[in-house]
Image: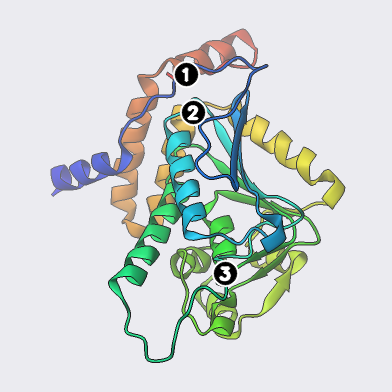
Amino acid sequence: MRLHLFAAAQSSVGTWRVPPDPPQSSLREPAVTHPSIRIETEGAVTTVTVDRPRRKNACTPAMWAGLRHGFRHIAESSARAVVLTGAGGDFCAGADVGPGDDIKAGDEPSRHRIDHMRDIGDTVMAIHDCPRPVIAKVDGVAVGAGLGMALAADMVWCSPRARFSLIFARRGLSLDFGTSWLLPKRIGLHEAKRLAFTGEIIGAERAAELGIVNEVVPVEELDAVVDEMAATVAAGPPIALAGSKRLLNNASNISLFQALEAESLSQGVNFASGDTKEAMRAFIEKRDPAFKGW
């Protein structure tokens, strides 16, 4: 039994290595995955911007694919932290449902629509499972799938102008973009059901009270606060942080015993890494460690 759970825990932990750091002065742009998805890397921090402000950054199917491919690229890159945000004073108004999306009453659920939702699900997984810590920076609206996008991140900072809603009920839809799984873990089942059943729009302070966001900061300070947090995370040990992220993401789905097994395996990876050895040397030498990601 113990060996079986050990194997299961091992498969859930896995290992990965981060390539050497890019020069801190570099500004690199990976191949553009979609013209409305901007991906920019400066030093060790990658910023992903949904850039369609005339539609409050509502995403088309091609944009969801661009986000998905972008985060898969980041997962294999040398970036150590990710900032996910929107352009033009809004985060994301969810999926772009316009006049061209002609849904008639009585339409059968087509294979095309189901496959489309599965593609969106792959985008959720690409964000949620990215081995780099992901920080959502929210200004303006984050509703529907846009709220799901923020919840898929590891941390959320927002301005007082932020507005959040599970707006699906107002559109005759049930939850998607992983919100049925992500939101209850943040705010509890009863509060999640209230937001799902009513489609209520809540402000930044209420979102902070519920636990949807980590902190509300003045809009003029939002960029600086998030940049500082991203830099702090990026300076940390990449292998250890990726291990901690996996452990926390998996914690509610496994037993305490399985969590302990997974922790043991993750620490085994860390003890074999140069970063842990560097941390020990830095502690003895009374200096800050310089983590390399190996």
Along the horizontal axis of the image, is 288 left or right of 33? right
Query: Which one is in front, 130 or 289?
Result: 130
Residue 76, above or below 109: above
Residue at 48% x, 80% y is: 173
Amino acid carrying label 2: it is Pro
> Tag 1: Cα neighbours inside 10 Å, few (<14), some, or many (≥20)?
many
* Disc 3 from disc 2: Cα separation: 31 Å
Residue 78, above or below 144: above
Q: Nearer the viewer, mark 2 or mark 1?
A: 2
Q: What is the number of callouts on the image?
A: 3
Upstream in sequence: badge 3 or badge 2: 3
* Disc 1 from disc 3: Cα separation: 40 Å
Q: Which residue is mark 2?
A: 238
> Tag 2: Cα neighbours inside 10 Å, few (<14), some, or many (≥20)?
many
Q: Which residue is mark 1?
A: 275
Percent from the top left, x then y, of residue 192?
Answer: 54, 75
Callout 1–callout 3 Cβ contact below 8 Å? no
Callout 2–callout 1 Cβ contact below 8 Å? yes
Upstream in sequence: badge 2 or badge 1: 2
Residue at 50% x, 13% y is: 278
Residue 45 location, quadrant: top right
Amino acid carrying label 3: it is Gly
Along the horizontal axis of the image, is 249 left or right of 114? right
Percent from the top left, x then y, of residue 108?
Answer: 32, 84
Residue 275, above or below 59: above
Residue at 46% x, 79% y is: 174
Percent from the top left, x then y, of residue 120?
Answer: 42, 60
Task: Please tell me the numbered disc located at residue 144.
Answer: 3
